Amino acid sequence: MRIKTRFTLHLSLGIILWMFMSGICILIGLEGILPLFKKSVSEDYENLLVVWIFGFSTVACIVVFGWYFGGPLGFIMSWIHQLSQENYKQPVGLSKIYTRKGKLRMRYMLYQEVLHHLQSLSGKLKAAETEREKVEQAKQEWIAGISHDLKTPLTYITGYSTLLLNDQYEWSKEEVCSFVQEIADKGKHMEELIQDLSLVIQLNSPDGQFPLHKTDQDIVEFTKRVVATISNNPQGNDYKLHFKTETPAINIKFDTKFMQRILQNILMNSIIHNPPNTNIYTKIFDSNEYVDIHIVDNGVGMSSHMQENIFQQYYRGTTTDSSSEGTGLGMAIVYKLVQSHKGTISVQSEPTKGTTFIITLPKR
């Protein structure tokens, strides 16, 4: 029953009850009480008594109606005011609106939908506030981390440049090449950090639009090439990368540049966060409408906290004792790039039992 209908019904019943009780009181006063004091009662006395009884019953009715209809409204307004002050705790007196059996009292039942929505809103606002605080804390930690990550290669570049420009020393050709190579590597690392920041800004654009240049290609052959590239990477020398598929070719539309970024990020994460000799399998499964890409490793796995936050921006989780050189944006970028392809990505993992990333892409 809607509030409007319920309110009208309660008000109508209240008015009927008020009129009925007023009539009974007037009848008792005229026929039962007044004759006890005077044998013959004039019409003026009768009219005066009727006015007094009617007035008293009206005042009593107003008080009762104010308590019945206005009390819950006052409680609701105070709760809304409390929420407006960013106080999401349970309001004082909330337990009093329920009976011992846990049901709403009659006068509060009149507004049960409002109370239910307020309780739900309070819970959601509290959860949003907690999440905002967590994101803000993660953001502050990320800013400190990214500042350190930018400062570290810059320190190397400045240091080696100073050595090369120092006239007091004569460096051999091999030493000069070594210095220049270090400067180039650190410069490339800084470039990757800046590209990540730029990409995240594009992905978080207010209009939600991100330009993809999709072409119709064989996702099986493309993924095989990415896995081969990673296996030839010096960081992947101590890891066993495998590729498996039951379908030799699957043509879908995707952006080559960003699909490579998706696969590389996940595969490199499997390498960075797992010990040497870890097996990393890339499997492709074909269905009628979708293509599933599973990247599975038998490494150290993840905690439930890491699984919950791995696709969050600014989260820099690690499953090893080594420090991560990432930006904390890699998996967040992967998540948004997969979404831009109208696909989904999820993670399944248990500590010491490995990790599985599942990418689902639509064929059309």
Image (spheres, helix red, strand yellow):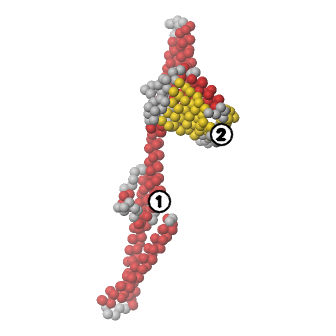
Of mark 2 and mark 1, the one earlier in the sequence is 1
For the residue pair 89 and 95, the one nearer the viewer reads as 95
Amino acid, disc 1: Val
User: Which residue is tagged 2?
Assistant: 363
Q: Quadrant of the C terminus?
A: top right
Question: Residue 230: x percent and y percent?
Answer: 57, 24
In the rendered image, the vertical position of residue 280 relative to residue 171, given as above or below: below
- Residue at 52% of width from left, 18% of height from top? 157
The number of callouts visible is 2
User: Which residue is tagged 1?
Assistant: 114
Question: Residue 292: x percent and y percent?
Answer: 59, 37
Q: Are marks 2 and 1 in contact (CB under 8 Å)?
A: no
- Residue at 52% of width from left, 6% of height from top? 170
For the residue pair 151 and 307, the one nearer the viewer reads as 307
Q: CA distance from mark 2 to mark 1?
A: 45 Å
Question: Residue 38: x percent and y percent?
Answer: 31, 91
Q: Which mark is residue 9?
A: none
